[in-house]
Image (cartoon, coloured by chain):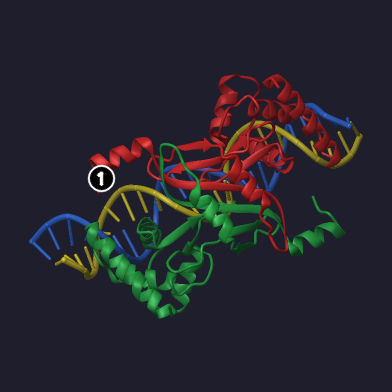
Chain colours: A red, B green, C yellow, D blue
Amino acid sequence: MSNEEVKALARERFTEYLEAHGQRKTPERYAILDAVYSSKGHFDIEGLHRTMVDDSRFHVSRATLYNTIDLLADAGLVVKHQFGDHTAHYERSLQTTPHHHLVCTQCGKVTEFVSAELERDIARVQTPDFRKTSYTLYIYGLCADCATAGTAARKH
Amino acid sequence: MSNEEVKALARERFTEYLEAHGQRKTPERYAILDAVYSSKGHFDIEGLHRTMVDDSRFHVSRATLYNTIDLLADAGLVVKHQFGDHTAHYERSLQTTPHHHLVCTQCGKVTEFVSAELERDIARVQTPDFRKTSYTLYIYGLCADCATAGTAARKH
DNA sequence: GTCAGTGCAAACTTTTTGCAACTAC
DNA sequence: GTAGTTGCAAAAAGTTTGCACTGAC
């Protein structure tokens, strides 16, 4: 499925969501959805805002960005992450390979990694008195760069 | 192992850490460690501060709390969590049963749940070019209360 | 035409920082 | 004695909110 097709699907899903929830279909919202589905990997509000301004696709305020990203999260089109710093990160969730996140505790870099077995194991878990909808697994540690740097000269 | 014994062990570990890192052994730091290891479950800085003030164990400022909790996290005596709101939560990590977290997306309640198999599965995972030290698994969904409330009258 | 949605700036919350006073070493 | 720590208050960073204006329905 090409990225354009994924975008079209996302727009369709978003339209359904907006209609089902009696929300207006504003150009801002679609512009944001489009920007999100043009991104690769993780992004934060600040970065998304800058990208949209730079590409001059559409002018949206930060407030609208926060607003809309919540709708997208609720619609299941975006996943929200909090990796450890106090900035929320997001990523598109349609047609992405299920993956986990490796977070470097030194430089903060986040990389994805795929493990079908782990995916299956987590999906299989029974949670008593809890209706699960999604999950996030963050593995913390040192990335290759920081690990070698740390071995050579451990800081402080 | 009684909680007093765990506390003693934690103090010992903290002392080793502080000495190994050339940091001072201030009464504030031990008071904070003690407060942390007197807590059950999750807490945030605000709550910890209030508890310490109310119990008048020791007066510490928020700044010192932030400072010290970072040391404790680095020493592996405390684990930091970001469940979705923009407040960091913490929990003691010595002599606790490995567990995962169920986060209710509606009321924000966090409950723990234990799964030895899942624990094993995650520990077993090979991460390429990454030296893992810890991980956190958050399962999002609806707790029993919110799920039944939602079935009766879905709010949006 | 109406009211939800937007933009802007101000407010708010959580965390970090600067600096004088303090104290562990 | 000295440099690392603390407390306070001010600042920073991220997010939310109030309000007048706009535009989707």
Q: Quarter of the image for the N terminus of chain B: give it.
A: bottom left
Q: Position of residue B57 (x, y in %)?
A: 40, 78
Query: Which residue is more in the foreground, A105 or A98?
Result: A98
Residue positioned 80% across, 38% down in the render:
A17
What residue does disc 1 label? A154
Question: Which chain does the numbered disc 1 sit on?
Answer: A
How would you rate the neighbour count of disc 1 (Cα within 10 Å): few for under 14, some for 14-19, many for 20 or more?
A: few
Three-letter amino acid code of the residue under disc 1: Arg
The residue closer to the viewer here, A55 or A79, is A79
Q: Is residue B56 visible?
A: no
The number of callouts visible is: 1
Q: Left or right: B1 with respect to C3? A: left
In percent of the image, x 63 and y 58: which residue is there?
B102
Q: Is residue B37 visible?
A: yes
Of residue A139 and residue A70, the one placed in the foreground of this image is A139
From the viewer's perspective, is A95 left or right of B38?
right
The vertical placement of B78 against B131, above or below, is below
In the rendered image, which quarter is residue B33 located in?
bottom left
Instruction: Residue at 53%, 68% (x, y): give it.
Output: B41
Q: Position of residue D4 (x, y in %)?
A: 23, 57
The percent position of residue B150, horizontal first and vertical second, equals: 81, 57
* Quarter of the figure with residue B151: bottom right
Q: Is residue B8 above or below residue B136?
A: below
* Relative height, residue B32 to residue B1 (above, below): above
